[in-house]
Amino acid sequence: MLKKSGTFGLEMIRILTNQLNGKMEFDGSNGAHFKFEFKESNKKESK
């Protein structure tokens, strides 16, 4: 997980990813690559 982004935009993405119980990974070895993982929700919408 990316701990400190240094920019406001990336910080907002990190916060939203945490709120959605997701994972965010960064690989800077050959350019900038981000990976996001979220679990599928089983909640049904009530009408």
Image (cartoon, helix red, strand yellow):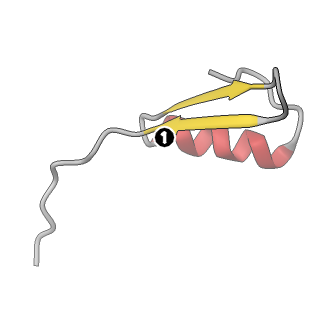
* Image point (27%, 45%), residue name: 40
What residue appears at the point 12 percent right and 61 percent down from the top-left corner? Answer: 44
- The picture places residue 35, in percent across and down from the top left corner, at 59, 35
Q: Residue at x 11, y 71 (%)?
A: 46
Q: Report whether 31 appears left or right of 24.
A: right
In the displayed structure image, the side of residue 22 where residue 30 appears, left or right: right
- Residue displayed at 73% across by 24% down: 27
In the displayed image of the protein, which residue is found farthest to the right?
Answer: 6
Question: Outermost residue toward the bottom?
Answer: 47
Residue 23 to residue 38: above or below: above
User: In which image quadrant can residue 2 be found?
Assistant: top right
Tag 1 secondary structure: helix
- The N terminus - image quarter: top right
Q: Amino acid at mark 1?
A: Gln
Quarter assignment of residue 8:
top right
Q: Nearer the viewer, residue 32 or 3?
A: 32
Classify residue 26 by image quadrant: top right
The number of discs equals 1
Q: Position of residue 31 (x, y in %)?
A: 85, 33
Give how far across and how far down residue 19 sits, in percent: 48, 40
Q: What residue does disc 1 label? A: 19
**How many other residues sit within 10 Å of disc 1, few (<14), some (14-19) or many (≥20)?**
few
Q: Is residue 37 left or right of residue 4?
A: left
Q: Position of residue 24 (x, y in %)?
A: 58, 31
- Which quadrant holds the C terminus? bottom left
